Amino acid sequence: MKTALMLCVVGLCLAVTSYAAPAEEFARADKLLSIGGCRIMDMEDFLVLLSTVPPSGKAYAVTNQQYSPPFAVKAKVQTDSTNIRLYYAAGEIILNWEVNQDELRFHNLVTGQPKGFPGMGHVTPMKWHDIVWEIRPTSTRLLVDGEERLNTYGDHEDLKGPIGIGPCFESILMLESFAVTPLEPEAAEEVEPPAAQAVPDDDPPAE
C-alpha cells in the first residue's frame, strides 16, 4: 500500500513539473496595440496589418503584455511583397528586407546595432510562413518554416517588454496567429553560428 501511494505521489509531482505554460494568442484586434500608425484590420480568419505613415516610417502592432526571457514567439504570417518585421526591446528582425530580400537583418536586442546575414532573409510573398523566434537569457534563435535562420549569443537577462510585428515600406501583412509561449530554462550550451556569416554595418542604410 505504501509503495503504491509513493508511486502515485511521484507521478503527480512529475505531472506538475512537466506541465508547460500555455501559449498566449495575440492575433486578435483587441489584444494588439497599434504603434506609429499601424492599422489593424480584423478579417475574421486573420488580421491585416498595414502602415498609415510614410513608407520609411515604422508602424507595427505590439502585444498588450510584457515578457522577459526565456520565451518563444510563434507567428503564422504572410507578406504581399516585402518586410515582415519583428520587434522586442531594442531589437528587430527583418525578413524580405526592401533593400535586399535575401539578407536577414538582425538588430541587437540590447544595443539595436544592425547586422546582415546573407542568404537567410527571403520568404515567398503571398504564402503563409511559420516563424518561431526564441529569446533566451543568453541567446536568440529564429526558425522560418522549420529552417534555422539565426542563432546567436546575447545578454538578454534583464530585458522586459512587449513583442511587436508589422509591415514597412508599404508592405501589407496577413497575420493568422501570433502567440507567445514561456520556455523552460535550460543549461548553458554552445550556440552554433548561422550557416551564413554576418556582415557588420559600418554605415548601414536606414531601416
Image (cartoon, helix red, strand yellow):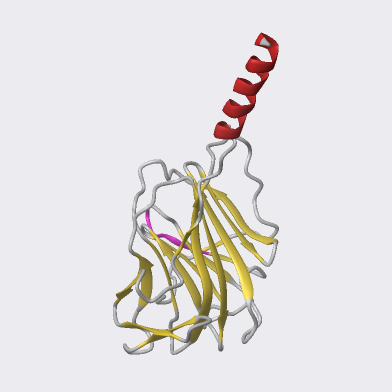
Query: What residue is rendered at 54% in x and 67% in y?
Result: 75
Q: Verify whether residue 112 appears in magenta.
A: yes
In the image, which residues are magenta?
Answer: 111-115
Residue drawn at the location 29% of the way across and 78% of the way down: 36
Residue 67 percent coordinates (x, y): 38, 52
Can residue 117 be seen here? The reply is yes
Q: Quadrant where the N terminus lies? A: top right
Left or right: 169, with 134 as reference point = left
Q: Is residue 95 left or right of residue 49?
A: right
Viewer-proximal residue, 62 or 43?
43
Residue positioned most to the top: 2
Residue 124, horizontal then vertical, whole percent: 66, 82
Q: Is residue 42 above or below residue 4?
A: below
Snapshot quadrant of residue 87 = bottom left
Residue 187 location (% of width, % of height): 58, 32
Q: Which percent across, then down, holds residue 174? A: 52, 82
Residue 186 is drawn in which quadrant?
Answer: top right
Quarter the C terminus occupies: bottom left
